[in-house]
Amino acid sequence: MRHHIRFYLGQTLHEVSDLSPTHTVLDWLRDQKGLTGTKEGCNEGDCGACTVMVVRLENGQLTWRSVNACIQFLWMLDGAQLFTVEHLQNPDSSLHPVQQAMVDLHGSQCGFCTPGFVMSMVAYVQNGGGDDPKAINTALAGNLCRCTGYAPIIRAMQQARRIMVQQGNRFDVEKQDIILRLSALQDGSSVDIQNTHGRITLPANSDVLAAVYQENPKATLVAGATDVGLWVTKHLRDLPHVIAVRSAKDLHKLEQRDGGLWIGAAVTYTQALPALATHLPDALETIKRIGSTQVRNAATVCGNIGNASPIGDGPPLFIAAGAVLHLRQGDTRRQLPLEHYFVEYGKQDRQPAEFIEGIFIPNQSAQTVMRAYKVSKRFDQDISAIMAAFAVSINADGEITEARLVFGGMAGIPCRAKMAEKALVGQKWDMAALEAARKAIQDDFTPLTDMRGSAWYRSTVSANLLTRFFEETAPQGSAQPICLEGWREISHA
Amino acid sequence: MLKKHINAPTTVPGGATQSLKHESGRLHVSGKATYIDDIPTPANVVHVVPGLSTKAHARIVSMDLEPVKNFPGVLCVLTAQDVLGENQISPVGAGDEPLLATDEVFYYGQPIFAVVAETRLAARKAARQAKIVYEDLPTVLCVEEARQKGGDMVCRPLEMVRGNAENALENAPKRLSGRITVGGQEQFYLEGQAALATPGEEGEMRICSSTQHPTETQHMVAHILDRPSNLVTVEVRRMGGGFGGKETQANAPACLAALAAEITQRPAKCRLDRDDDMIMTGKRHDFVIDYDVGFDAQGHIQGVDMLLAARCGWSADLSGPVTDRALFHADNAYYYPDVRLRSEPFRTNTQSNTAFRGFGGPQGIAAAERVIEEIAFATGMDPLDVRLRNTYGRQDKNITPYFMTVEDSISREIMEQLAEECDYRKRREELRAFNRSSKYIRRGIALTPVKFGISFTATHFNQAGALVHVYTDGSVQVNHGGTEMGQGLHTKMVQIAMREFGLPENRVRITATTTGKVPNTSATAASSGADLNGMAVLDAISKIKERLISFAATHWQVPESTVHFGANGVQVGDNCIPFVDVVKAAYMARVSLSSSGFYKTPKISWDPKTGRGRPFYYFAYGAACAEVAVDLLTGENRMERVDILHDAGQSLNPILDIGQIEGGFIQGAGWLTMEELVWDQTGRLRTHAPSTYKIPACSDRPPIFNVKLLENSPNQEETIFRSKAVGEPPFVHGLAVLHAISDAIASIADYRICPQLDAPATPEQILRTVERLKKQKDMPH
C-alpha cells in the first residue's frame, strides 16, 4: 500500500500526498506549479482551453491522451506522465512543429484557446492521426475557438502533421525514456491517502475496490470524473472519500467473450470505440459525438451508465443492443438487463456499496437491423435533445419478431417506446407499420421542454426518427442513409 | 559615421499593407502570453466573488450575510454600503446601474454583494451561503411582454424619416408586411471577465483588466473609490477575446476588485466563473422587427416602414447607440425611396444587453434582408435580383434614411463578381433540381451583401491618441489607446511604425495599453481600432520623423526632400545611414525622439434630434454566398460551401484581415443558427455555460470555404493607408446561411411561400418552419 501518488510532470517525478480528493489538475498546475499556459475557459470540460496530454503505459503500449485538466483530479494522474503546453518546446527552445504551424498559418488570434488546441493537436499526431478533415474535426471537437472560425487551425494541423510524419518530433525521440520511466511506476500496489482534506483510495484491483467500498459505502466512486468533476467545479461539492475505478487493473478488460462484447468498468469510450464500432457498427458516429475527444479519453462506458443521466447517449444504444449490466457488492455478483437498471429519474437499481464491474453486449443476430440517431443543436460535443437507438429483428417472412426502440431525452430515464414497439411486432416492416408506430409513440412519452428542445420538438422528432429508420431499413424505404452529407472532402488546399 | 551608398527600397518587409504574423503568435502557442489570471500575484492577494440575485425582479426584504462572513477564509463581504463613492456604473450616465444592488433587484444574476476571501474557492463557496429574503415584483422578460405591460424603455427611441413612407406604401403596386425575430448572442470570449487591482501609495490604484475600454474602467473605478482619475491606472496587455462583451461589462469586475483592494489594502482579483459571467453580463440584443414594404412587380422597393424593438435588459448600458445602429443598418445596401424607421429599446428584467460585434447593425440588416426575401417570393424573382435591383447608386438613389449620401457604393459590383466567381446561378438551378428528387434532405443557397457604416455614431468618440518613443539604440516603442483582443490591432500598429521608420519587426515593440501613457481614449469598438489608433500612431511617428528629417538635412547639409526612411536605413541625400546612427546623432543634437499623436475623424456629424447627418466616415462592403443542407425530419443542418468576397480597402494586413473575415463569418453563422439563449419563466438564464450554450465547433465550419479580399479597392476616404475597418462587417456574412436554410425550406412549397424563418435557426426552429410551410402549402391562396 502506497500513501502518496506518483507521476511525472514533464520530466520531473512528483510524489504527492498533501492533496484533497477534489484538487483538480488545472488548479494544481496554475496555482501550485505556476504553469499558467493551461487556461481555464469554462471549468466544466466543454471548451478545451485547459487541454493537457496524459501519457500512460497500457498493455505495454504508450497512449497519448488529451484530457480536460479542469475536470481531472490530481490523484487520477497516478502512474502517468503529464505534459502541458510548457513542455512542448525543444531543448533549443525552438517551437514544436504544431506550435510552429499554428504561428505560421495564423491559427491564433486572441490566443486564449491556443494552448488547448496545441495540446489536442499534439496528442492527435502522437496517436497516429491522419490528414482526413473528418478525423481532425473529431479530434478537435472539444476545443472551442471564438476568433478564427477554425479554418487556419485545421490548415495548421495538416501542415504540422506532414512535418511530424516526415521529421518526427521530440516525443518520438523520448518514447523509450517515457516507457522506462512509466514502467518503473507500475508497482501494482493500491494507494490510500488520508489527510486533513479527506481520503483517496486507488484500489489496485476490483477485489480491493469491492472491499473498500463495502467498508465505506458512502464514498464516491470516480471513474473518468467527466461528470463528478462538475459536482466539484460547478456545484462546489466536497467529496470526503473518493474511490478510484480506473486504478483497478482487472476492470480494464475489453474482450469478446461468450457471444458478446465485454466492457470492463474502467474502459473509456476512446478505448472501447474500435471494438464497439465492430460490434455495433451504428454506434460509431454516435460515440464519436459523445462529449469530445478529451471527454471520451477520460469518460468510461460504464460511468455513462452509472451516473444514470436521462440524456446519456450510451444507455439507449446499449439497451437497444440488449446489454446486460454486471454488478458487484463485496463478493456478491448479479446481472441485470441494462434497461432495468434505470428505475426512475435519480433512482437506479444499485444497492449501497454495489458497483458496476462491466457491461456485456451480446452479438446481434443476423436478423437484427440496428440504427442509432443523435439529434442535438450542435453536431459535435452537444448533449442530445433526443437520442434514439432502434433494433428490429425481421424473420424470413419479413415479419418483425422483436423491436427495441430506445430513447434518451424523452423521459426521466433512458427508456423503450413500448407502445410503438407493440405496434411493430408481428407486422411487416411497411408503411402501415410505420404509421402505427408513429402514432403509438405519441402515447409512449410526455417529454419535457427545456433549453435543448421543446416537448413538441421531441415528440415530433421521435416519430420522424422512426420514419428515418424506415427509409433506411424497410423494403419500401429508399435504403439510403438519411444523413447530412456535411463532410464532403475539401476540394482545395 | 558609417555611410552606405545603397538606395533604400520603398517598402519594408512586413510593413503596413503587407501580411505579417500576429505579434503574439509565438507567445500564444507556447502558453507564455499573459492574461489577467496569469499575472504572478503576491501571496497576500485576495479573491472577490460576487453574490448574485436569484430573482428577476424583487424587493430585498432582508439579507443575512452572517453565514457568508463566517465561512472559513472569508475576510469581508462588500455590499452597496461599502462603496466609497457613488454606487453607480452606468457607462452612459443613465444612473440606472448600481454596482451592487440596494433594496431591489432587476434581473436574475444581478450582483448584490461580493465576498472577499483568501482563496477563490472559499469565496465561491461562501457566496452561496447568503440568506436573502425577496418579495417578488412583476417581471417583464421579453419584447412582447414589455409592449403589453406599458412599454418602459431604457432610453429614448429613435425615429428616422425620409419622404413619406405611408403614402409610398399606399401607392405601391404591391405591399406586404411581416415580422422577423432575431435572437441574442453570448459573446463567449474564451477568457472570462477578470481584473486584478493593486493598491499603491496615497490612494493610487493600479488595475490590470481584461477590458476593451481602459479609460472607462479607470473612470468607473475612480467614481466607485471616490477619487480623481489621476490616482487610477488601468492597463491591459491583451484580452482572451472581447467581441464587445468587454466594452462596458469589464467595469463591474474591475470595480469590485478595486473596492476589495482598497478595503483590505491587499491586491485583489476578481475573475468570474464562466457560469457567473454568462448569468451576470449583457449579451447581443435580440430584436422583434415589424416591417411593412411597398414595391412594384419588378421588385423595386418604393416605401419601407419598420419598427425595431429590442430586449435591452434592466438598464440602459449601451442600448441607445445599439438600437440606433440597428436603424442605421435597417437599409443594409438598399435604397429606400420613402422610409420610416423607429426603435423601441424596451426595458426588461434580464441581463443588460450590451455591445457585441456589429452593435445592433446585424439585427437591422437581418430585417432588411428579410424584406428582400419577402419581395422575391412575392414577385417570383431570384432574391439576388431583388438585391441587385435595389442597391444604392452612386449618382442617384444614394441617400440613406438618415440623409447621408452614399458616395462609395460598390454592393452591386461585389455581388455580381461573387455570383460569377462562385457560380451562384448555375448552382441554384442544380440545387433546385436536386430538391425535386430528394424527399428529406433539401439544399439551399443564398447570396447576401453587407454595407456597414464605419465610425462611432457618437461623434466625439472618434478620436484617438498614441505615444511613440524612439530610444537612442534605434529601437522604437509604440503605445496607443486601442486594446488587443486577438484582432491583430497591435500587429497593425507595429507595421505602421515598421513602414514609416523602415525598421524590422524586432526593432518595434508594442506595449500594453495603459491609461498612464495615452489618456481619454475611446473603447476599442465599432471596428474603429486600426482606423483611429493607426492615424494617431502615424501622427506621432510623423512628428518624430519631421524632427529627424529637419535635423538630418541640417546636419548632413542636404535638402529635406532628399531624406527618406527605408528598409536599409535613412536615405540622406546620396547616403544611406543606419536608422540608429541618425537617431544617435539627433539625440546628441538634443532633438526630441518621443512624441504623442492624435487623430480625429474628419467629415462626420450626427444629430439624433433631426435624424440627419453623416454619422459614418465611410462604408465597408462585402458579400457572402452560402450553400446548406437541411434535414426535413429533424431540422438538422450543415453548411456545405461558403464563398466570401470582402472589401477591406487597401488592407493593412491581408492575412489578418482574412482571419477577421473567416472568424467573423463563423461567429455570425453561429448567431443565426445554433446559438440560442434560453430564459425560463422565472427569468433565469438556462444557457449559461458551453454545455448548454453552443457556439460553433470545428466541424461546423463549411468544408469548402473560400474567402477573398476585394482587390484594387482603396478606401476613397483618407484612412490609414486607404484601408478599411474589418472587425464587424464580416460578421454580417452569416446571414447568407440563414437565407440559404430558408431557401432549402422553401422547396417544400415549391418556392411559392416565403418561409419567414426566424433566427436562431436551430433544428427546432427549422422543423417548426418546415411544418408550418407544409400546412400553408395546402391552404388556398
Image (spheres, rainbow, N blue to C red):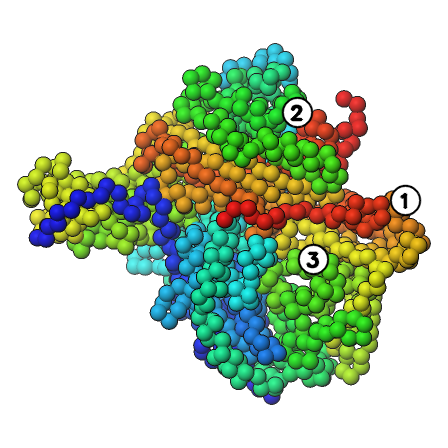
Q: Quadrant of the C terminus of chain B?
A: top right
Kindly give the residue lying farthest to the bottom in the view shown.
Answer: A1
Mark 1 and mark 2 on one chain: no
Q: Percent from the top left, x then y, of residue B246?
A: 46, 47
Q: Which residue is mark 1?
A: A432
| One can see residue A187 in this view | yes
Numbered badge on residue B377? 2
Q: Kindly state the secondary structure of the residue where label 2 is placed.
A: helix
| Chain letter of the residue carrying label 3 | A
Q: Is residue B571 left or right of residue B363?
A: left
Rendered view: B495 above or below A128: above
Instruction: Count neighbours of disc 2 (C-alpha within 10 A) and say few if under 14, some if 14 to 19, many if 20 or more.
Output: some
Numbered badge on residue A286? 3
| Chain letter of the residue carrying label 2 | B
Instruction: Count neighbours of disc 3 (C-alpha within 10 A) and say few if under 14, some if 14 to 19, many if 20 or more.
Output: many
- Residue for point 61% across, 26% down: B382
Rendered view: A162 above or below B378: below
Mark 2: amino acid: Phe
